[in-house]
Image: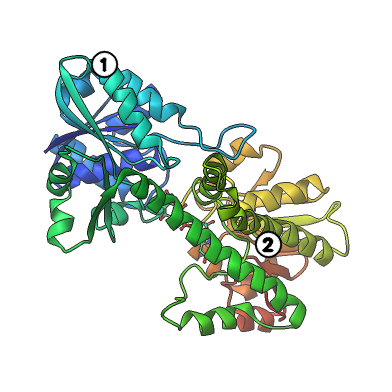
Amino acid sequence: MRMTVIGTGYLGATHAACMAQLGHEVLGVDVDQSKIDLLKSGEVPFYEPGLPEVLSRNLESGRLNFTTDYAAVAEFANVHFLGVGTPQKRGSYAADVTYVRAVIESLVPLLEGDHLILGKSTVPVGTAAELQELADELAGDKANVEIAWNPEFLREGYAVKDTLTPDRIVLGIRKGESSAEEIAREVYATAIEAETPFLVMDLATSELVKVSANAFLATKISFINAVSEICEIAGADVTQLADAIGLDERIGRKFLGAGLGFGGGCLPKDIRAFMARAGELGADQALTFLREVDAINMRRRDHMVQLAKHACGGSALGKNITVLGASFKPNSDDVRDSPALSVAGSLSLAGGEVTVYDPQGMDNARKVFPTLTYAESTDDALKGADIVILATEWQEFREIDPVRAAELVADKVIIDGRNVLPVQAWQDAGWNLTALGRSL
Ligand code: UGA
């Protein structure tokens, strides 16, 4: 099939490359010329394992191309995926759908014949119906444009796998006449043949599926982090507790990783936008618990800063503090709302000499926090540290040899913000190890 993908950020670039990998002919479009130039030359503008290979392979095969020209998009295909960002609005919790609307405003007047626009962006419920109205106004006599919604559930770090072999495909379609299901079945034929559940529903439900999924994941993380606060006071161990409750199939162990909490471009923004939308709909009470989910999550960062100051003897002033990790999670260079950087920044503002190292997130971190010191390697970061904080659980950090690390630091004090270090080995090497939610 021929299709276009509008917006070549995280979601769009991955979707475009993976659709080509499935055998489709794909044209990706973005207003950012520098991004398009990079993609055309086979370079992914962010870190995502496996994506550079899929991109290059499909550029070479000729099935994948990129442009900044909307007229080319209108010409190229009758199926268009919309994957532009919906960031948090300045001064508000709501999601900003300006970019999504701008795509419809730019594209629809150029269309002729029958076209389907499949939205993938995470949007407030009701957006797709509004976009359909907008498209109907803008479409000339020559075009018939349908808007459907096809939310995306990919995780950073696993984006290629999640796109090629999703665990479900959700499609929201309008009432009345619609060609979306038939077309989507063809687009996703490979996954559907492999018996991936394909769920067709109304537009509003499909929009809500996406934000509800992220709100549930955020709630699960904050639940265990709230329990972890109690564990710390009561002298219990949150990791053993999570293992034990996670064995109940109804609960499950995934997303019960207690620690510094969630960050990134999706979970924090999506729970806030969900609350804001509930308020607009006159149902703010329904989601007030998400405020607590957010607050528990933010408390994790403050708690880590307090623990670090305590470990420094009461004040961070003049102490050499090493923060391992800058990205919001491992296998990503994304530092948006990163708990690691938040902690590093706070300790720096409190007078600490903070050194940060991350295997992939350094360039992005430097842009956000230029005043921190950035080390060349883990070893380099550990040199002379009075205290070490593990803030993002990269494999490289999990595998640090505590005996060797002990030779590099000034003081053998470490706080495990992700509960991933082998406690016994670190203690045997003489380290004073503290971990969130455990009394060690
Ligand atoms: C999240 C969802 O998991 C995806 O399904 C969704 O498609 C995506 O948002 C999106 O809306 O685009 P992602 O932001 O890549 O994906 O990150 P997650 O893997 O969900 O992790 C989010 C944060 O939670 C990270 O900071 C991670 O460290 C933290 N986390 C995760 C925990 O603190 N504990 C856990 O047990 C799991």
Q: Amino acid at mark 2?
A: Ile
Number of marks in picture: 2
Instruction: Using residue 385 as the reference point, say whether residue 215 is left or right of it.
Output: left
For the N terminus, the quadrant is: top left
Residue 318: in sight, yes or no? yes
Question: Is disc 2 placed on a helix, strand or loop?
Answer: strand
Classify residue 300 by image quadrant.
bottom right
Query: Residue drawn 66% across and 60% down?
Result: 296
| Residue 351, above or below 411 | above
- Residue behind mark 1: 109
Instruction: Using residue 194 as the reference point, say whether residue 400 is left or right of it.
Output: right
For label 2, the crowd category at 10 Å Cα-Cα, with few meaning under 14, some 14 to 19 and many 20 or more, is many
Alpha-carbon span between mark 2 and mark 1: 53 Å
Question: Is disc 1 placed on a helix, strand or loop?
Answer: helix
Measuring from the top left, give residue 279's x and y in whole percent.
Answer: 57, 43
Pointers 2 and 1 in contact (C-beta within 8 Å): no
Which of the pair 71/222 is nearer the observer?
222
| Residue 153, above or below 396 | above
On residue 148, the disc is none
Query: Residue drawn 20% across and 39% down?
Result: 176
* Ligand 1 is within 8 Å of the C-beta of the residue at disc 1: no
- Residue behind mark 2: 389
Query: Residue drawn 29% across and 47% down?
Result: 202
Residue 156: in sight, yes or no? no
For label 1, the crowd category at 10 Å Cα-Cα, with few meaning under 14, some 14 to 19 and many 20 or more, is some
Which of the pair 228/393 is nearer the observer?
228
Which of the pair 104/247 is nearer the observer?
104
Measuring from the top left, give residue 432's x and y in whole percent.
Answer: 74, 75
Instruction: Using residue 434 as the reference point, say whether residue 51 is left or right of it.
Output: left
Measuring from the top left, give residue 114's x and y in whole percent.
Answer: 14, 27
